[in-house]
Image: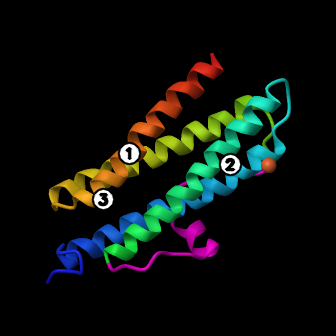
Amino acid sequence: MKNQIGLESGYANQMTEKLNKLLSNIQVFYMNTRGFHWNITGKHFFKLHEKFEELYDDLNEKADEVAERILMLEGKPVHAFSDYLKMADIQEKTNLSSDQATIKEVLDALLVLLKQEREIAVSAAENGDDGTVDLITGYISGQEKTIWMLNAFLK
Ligand SMILES: [Fe+2]
């Protein structure tokens, strides 16, 4: 059976689960990044305070895009934080304030997202789901660039 956008419903259900897990990771990472924005101290305060805001704004936008992709696939996006915490691989990080500690957490979280997004892109490509491929590959290249820049900052 095909869904509203002409994709197999069985595939769409599986992809919904994957995207809900990605959404959960994005939401926990979003809140962590807000905390880094608030709590950062030290000589790079102004740079990192601003950088973390840029990151959480971007994650906020991604959460909306992923949730709406789920709706296009006729799934239900998870929207309770209690569910996000159960489904996410990224853990809550509280009270970090040093540049090294906060950037390390951002790098680790980006790698979690990348691993999941690469799996999603492969599965979507195998099932002719170009819309999901298009959305997710943009995330991958953008996050790879962020990782390079944060690593350069740490050196
Ligand atoms: Fe702020």
Magenta segment range? 74-94
Three-letter amino acid code of the residue under disc 2: Thr
Judging by the rendered image, the residue that carries numbered circle 1 is 138
Q: Which mark is residue 132?
A: 3
- Structural crowding at the residue carrying mark 3, measured as other residues with C-alpha within 10 Å and reported as few (<14), some (14–19) or many (≥20): many
- The residue that disc 2 covers is 33
Q: Amino acid at mark 1?
A: Gly
Residue name at image x 63 percent, y 34 percent: 104
Disc 1 to disc 3, how far (Cα)? Answer: 10 Å
Q: Marks 2 and 3: CB-CB under 8 Å?
A: no
Q: Nearer the viewer, residue 68 or 124?
A: 68
The answer to which of 77 and 82 lies nearer the viewer is 77
SS label for mark 2: helix
Nearest to viewer (mark 2 / mark 1):
1
* Residue 17 screen position, x and y as percent: 37, 70
Q: Quadrant of residue 22?
A: bottom left
